[in-house]
Amino acid sequence: MSAADQGASPPAGKAERAGLFERLRSMFGFEGATAREDVEEAIEEASREGDFSQQELSLLKNVLSLHELRVEDVMVPRADIIAVELNQSLETILSLFRTANHSRLPVYSETLDDPRGMVHILDFVDFVARSAEGRRSRTRPATGEAPPSDINKIAGMIGLDLTIPLANANILRPVLFAPPSMPALDLLVKMQTSRTHMALVIDEYGGTDGLVSIEDIMEMIVGDIEDEHDDEESERIEAAADGSFVMSARAHLDAVGEHIGGEIAEHADREEVDTIGGLVTAMAGRVPVRGEIIRLSDTVEAEIIDADPRKLKRLKLRRRSAPAATE
């Protein structure tokens, strides 16, 4: 036997184990292991041997489990969609972009069941910039001298007519449409090939059931993707007139404790969580739905203001009027 042949042969121990497994599978009527099962077993073995970090293991497992997810598992439900109407003014659209913290907004006519596309913040900014440049070129003196300061103001944002409807701006882009049962991985591939990062989920009757962005699918693999605005939002805890506190689900429990009191710290230590959203989810044993009230202690309860099927977004904490009676 040549050295090359020896190098190509598997070790005797592994070959014997593989043969034994195959004989056992045949004896009990099981089919041979699939490539996916082989990969999953290899990941489990690597995790026991410490070949991968916890972050790497999490990513690998999430990638393998992605084939089980459907669009309905990752979509934002219809009730939580922030959308704009086709005939709303550019001023209204700008205000929505400021408060929604989204770069894309779906556009509809009359109802959300009649979608017309989406508007991207970059297209909106480009339209405003081109309008300002056109106005400046029309008002610039023929002598080539620098325009006076009042003309500069006219050429700026203040001088633009933002009362025109979105329909007249010609900045709409198409969106994809997907059924709820479509595999999320198939939609991700379709988004990549079409370079369209938003899809509306359409039910069997043609109505809008939800919305999926490419970020929603990617978060199933890498976890929550936060940006500068998310960090700023997560630190904000607002006091309401009724004595309650409204906050992001990502608010750290130390900051929450400074407003509500330290009694939830004991629960946080037991559940091993750092955020108020994590604590509420852990104590409920699931992701609560919008409008649901979860009791955190005898004196504190949380009302869910905003959530999707995967995570909490915003909630309200308030003190209960009296401790719950013991049974």
Image: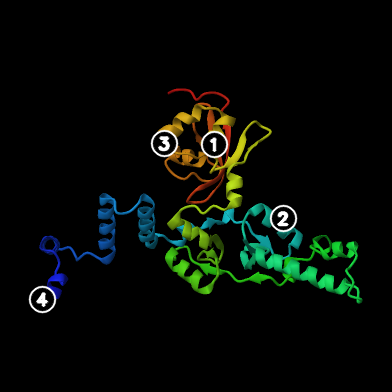
Query: From the viewer's perspective, is residue 188 above or below residue 81?
Result: below
Compare residues 139 and 296 and report the one nearer the observer. Answer: 139
Residue type, label 3:
Glu
Marks 4 & 3, CB-CB < 8 Å contact: no
Q: Which mark is residue 26?
A: none
Residue with the mark numbered 3: 271
Q: Position of residue 324 (x, y in %)?
A: 50, 25
Which of disc 1 and disc 2 is earlier in sequence? 2
Compare residues 234 and 207 and report the one nearer the observer. Answer: 234
What's the distance in space between the residues labelled 1 and 4, CA to CA?
72 Å
Marks 2 & 3, CB-CB < 8 Å contact: no
Q: Position of residue 115 (x, y in %)?
A: 62, 67
Residue with the mark numbered 2: 95
Quadrant including the C terminus: top left
Residue with the mark numbered 1: 302
Q: Residues within 10 Å of mark 1 (few under 14, many from 20)?
A: many
Task: Select label 1 or label 3 by which is in front.
Answer: 3
Name the residue located 25 percent from the left edge and 51 percent from the top edge: 49
Circle 2 — which element?
helix
What's the distance in space between the residues labelled 1 and 3, CA to CA?
16 Å
